Amino acid sequence: MAKPFASSADLGEKQQSLEVPAEGVYALTAEGDPNVGAIEGEDFLVCFEALATPVAARAWLARLREHTDKPIRYLVLSHYHAVRVLGASAFGADVIVTHEKTRELIAERGEQDWASEYARMPRLFKEPASIPGLTWPTATFSDRFTIDLGGERGDLVLEHCGRGHTEGDLVAWLPRRRIMFAGDLVESQAALYTGDAFHREWSSSTLDRVASFGAETLVGGRGAVARGKRGVDAAIAQTREFLAVMLREVGAAGTLKEAFDRTHRALAPQYGSWPIFEHCLPFNVSRLWDELHGIERPRIWTAERDREVWDQLQS
Ligand SMILES: [Zn+2]
């Protein structure tokens, strides 16, 4: 029997959990659905990630408002993917911050990515008509962007650690609390999506840089909050191992279909039951196949190309 396309048949509501890993720091996780967070400044809020639609974002903000009524000055978006950014208008933030490459990617492929992600993960797009259009950052940076949180709260540091999940990922680092929001550069017991990735760089220098902060709490893109040095190290190691297995298996294959079958066989015992594993794998292998055959930048996913790759590999 054919597997249903991507996450199109995944329609069950996920349980959301609001965690407060330190005073004034919030993380909303949802059993493998995209995570969001917020950090309190002295008299303002920084929100991290925006979910797929304003309606989805408003439900998150209602929970956040049970804890703080400070105005949202900054909305930080870790990368360009639609399910992370298209809810931005709900925040009414003064400043929307991304890496400079993220702005370029939104201009180059934001429309196609929106259509692609909507077809892949329709459940995440609550009331899609509430999306007013593409989300555009109002501030960008190349290496580092620092937000002074005021009072005794220290800085929130946004940093680009190299290419990884996309060409323009950022992490948010709260040194005083040793808490990191890593976006999709690190997943915690959720499968990786690598369809727009730079696998070799991500699995080596980029994750080395992420690990070098020495976080003691890490909120990844999906999955539970990783707690303690051991928990953070385990999440980073899981991410690196997933990439290493993909590189090994795709690198040893003679055809794209063989690459998919080998990778599936190698990853399924450990990762097969984790959220979005079956959904992601065809797109992941297709991109890595390209990367290993000299295609430097990820090809643009369209709703049509998604179906072609799916039918070729998952059927
Ligand atoms: Zn992503």
Image (spheres, helix red, strand yellow):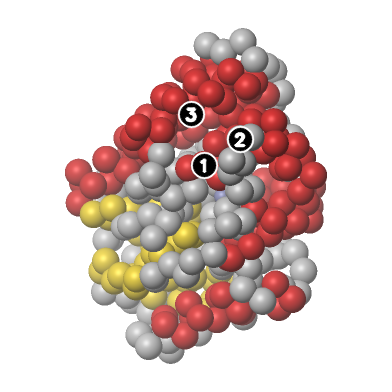
Q: Residue at x 61, y 79 (%)?
A: 55
Secondary structure of residue under mark 2: loop
Q: Earlier in the sequence, mark 2 or mark 3?
A: 3
In the picture, measured across the screen, residue 16 lies left or right of residue 1, that is left
Q: Is residue 127 or residue 91 the one in the foreground?
A: 127
Q: CA distance from mark 2 to mark 3?
A: 10 Å
In which quadrant of the rendered image does the C terminus lie?
top right
List the residue tagged with mark 2.
314
Q: CA distance from mark 1 to mark 2?
A: 8 Å
Q: CA distance from mark 1 to mark 3?
A: 9 Å
Residue 244's x, y, as percent?
A: 43, 24
Q: Quadrant of residue 93?
A: bottom right
List the residue tagged with mark 3.
264
Q: Earlier in the sequence, mark 1 or mark 3?
A: 3
- Residue 278's disc is 1
Q: Residue at x 44, y 50 (%)?
A: 275
Vertical position of residue 116 compared to residue 155: above or below: above
Instruction: Name, please, the residue furthest toward the front.
Output: 1
Secondary structure of residue under mark 3: helix
| Crowd around label 2: few <14 · some 14–19 · many ≥20 (10 Å) | some
Residue 97's x, y, as percent?
A: 60, 62
Vertical position of residue 136 compared to residue 227: above or below: below
Q: Residue at x 63, y 68 (%)?
A: 125
Say whether marks 2 and 3 touch (CB < 8 Å).
Answer: no
Residue 110's x, y, as percent?
A: 75, 54
The number of discs equals 3
Q: Is residue 303 or residue 150 the one in the foreground?
A: 303
Say whether marks 1 and 2 touch (CB < 8 Å).
Answer: yes
